[in-house]
Amino acid sequence: MHFPALTLALLTCAGTSVAAANTTKPYSTWMASSFLSKGQKINNHYVASVIHEGIQKAATAQKDSKLLAYASDAVSSLVTPNGTLIGWRPTFYTLDDIRIGNNILYFWNSEGRKEKKYEIAAKGLREQLNRWPRTPKGGFFHRDPIYKNQMWLDGIYMADTFYATYVSYFEPTNTTAWNDIALQFDLIEEHCRNKTSNLLQHGYSEDKKAVWANPVTGASPHVWDRAVGWYFVALVEVLEVYPSNLPGHARLLEYLTTLADGVKKAQDASGGWWLVMDEPYPGMKGNYIESSATAMFTYAYLKGIRLGLLDQSYTATASKAWDLMIDDFVQHEKNGTLSWTGTVEVGSLAGNASYDYYVGVKKAINDGKGAGPFMYAATEVELAQAL
Ligand SMILES: *[C@@H]1O[C@H](CO)[C@@H](O)[C@H](O)[C@H]1NC(C)=O
Ligand SMILES: *[C@@H]1O[C@H](CO)[C@@H](O)[C@H](O)[C@H]1NC(C)=O
Ligand SMILES: *[C@@H]1O[C@H](CO)[C@@H](O)[C@H](O)[C@H]1NC(C)=O
Ligand SMILES: *[C@@H]1O[C@H](CO)[C@@H](O)[C@H](O)[C@H]1NC(C)=O
Ligand SMILES: *[C@@H]1O[C@H](CO)[C@@H](O)[C@H](O)[C@H]1NC(C)=O
Ligand SMILES: *[C@@H]1O[C@H](CO)[C@@H](O)[C@H](O)[C@H]1NC(C)=O
């Protein structure tokens, strides 16, 4: 596989320090060690989970044992010897806090499946899902009680990759669970998918009580790039473990391939994607090309291709996005480390979900919700180049 524009992008790197542009260093571990030099703390919040997953992916791909040991020790420090996940609130239901379960399962599996404390901690999260408050149709509340009867695309990434990975390890023949996982995607698709653009609105309110709810579908009014990014990644990661003999598999694959098509059509000429993706907002005053979703889409395309779920033709889409990230979002610091720019701090359905709301949120430097996915994407670029 080739990334023809890649070398050129590296040579013409628009970072603050040209001297720091170094074509021999893999970006995955470069960004990961840069993040470590800024000081990282692990906790059970999803942003820490994502940063540590980025470090773990980079370290694994580049066989960097020091970085991998860091990620492993960090996750280990979060689970006490008796299997208590520090910070976990078993009766507080917010899908964001399930994401850390993926980091735990990763090291449980990769370190020989012998660490009992990881099994206990993961089982706690799994059992919490069995108690989770749900919409009348069976969707997990994004958070109880404030987002009661709401499903957000973000929540699919936070909980359902863990749910699927756990079931693949511990309950592989539990058809009820596999169907339940597919149902979470089905509900999002039924309410949020725009069949013309093939993009999805940020979320929906099943009882239509949210101020922003569409009176027919319950959907929120806009397509927010990062929500679509999380969802795209979740489809790839769930399909990686979903049994191909169950009917849910074909549906998930259809959701993935149609989304891949919609996202490709929405790609800007620069190679990136707009914060608010639905027409007529791309290019409109206040809107901008946002970095976290650009990283997530790049990762989802390349991993989807690597797993044989997506067509090779999307390599060009990902390559173009990668070049933009290297040129515009990766910032070279004087001391040779990298920083990550251009990530919007938040996008929530807590308020009015208007265009003005989304574009009014600030961008942050070194935001893990963008830098983590950049590490994921870099890892896939490096795996593809190694072919
Ligand atoms: C590029 O990175 C490698 C590996 O870290 C290092 O040995 C080399 O000195 C760097 N070259 C430049 C020009 O910075
Ligand atoms: C390099 O500089 C960045 C930005 O000033 C800083 O955050 C980071 O801690 C520094 N890293 C090292 C290894 O000096
Ligand atoms: C598990 O260990 C933690 C601290 O190490 C302690 O607070 C907790 O009570 C223990 N739980 C059980 C069930 O033993
Ligand atoms: C199978 O999955 C369902 C739905 O998640 C769950 O309620 C049930 O406890 C699981 N069964 C087993 C044997 O784990
Ligand atoms: C769906 O997408 C099309 C094409 O971008 C657009 O014209 C239409 O308004 C969208 N529908 C909704 C409900 O957002
Ligand atoms: C929606 O909220 C934003 C702030 O988040 C505000 O600027 C805007 O005026 C509000 N729009 C409406 C229609 O209430």
Image (spheres, helix red, strand yellow):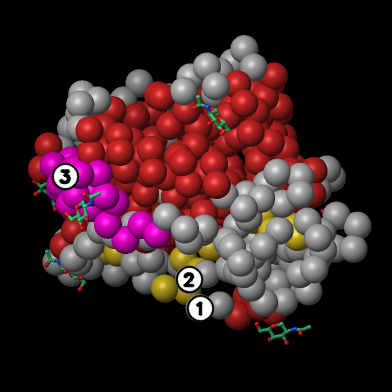
Which residues, given as a range, are shown in magenta? 68-89
* Residue 101 picture quarter: top left
Q: Quadrant of ligand 2?
A: bottom left
Residue 147, relative to residue 72: is it above or below? Answer: below
Q: At 44% from the left edge and 31% from the top edge, which residue is drawn?
A: 165
Local crowd size for mark 1, using a 10 Å CA cut-off: few (<14), some (14–19), many (≥20): few
Residue 202, relative to residue 68: is it above or below? Answer: below
For disc 2, the marked residue is 345
**On the rendered image, what quadrant is the N terminus found in?**
top left
Q: Earlier in the sequence, mark 1 or mark 2?
A: 2
Measured as percent of width and height from the top left, residue 353 is found at 70, 72
203 sits to left or right of 315: right
Three-letter amino acid code of the residue under disc 2: Glu
| Circles 1 and 3 in contact, beta carbons < 8 Å | no
Residue 81 disc label: 3
Residue 358, relative to residue 198: is it above or below? Answer: below
222 sits to left or right of 297: right
| Circles 2 and 3 in contact, beta carbons < 8 Å | no
Q: Earlier in the sequence, mark 1 or mark 3?
A: 3
Q: At 72% from the left edge and 51% from the top edge, which residue is drawn?
A: 135
* Residue 204 picture quarter: bottom right
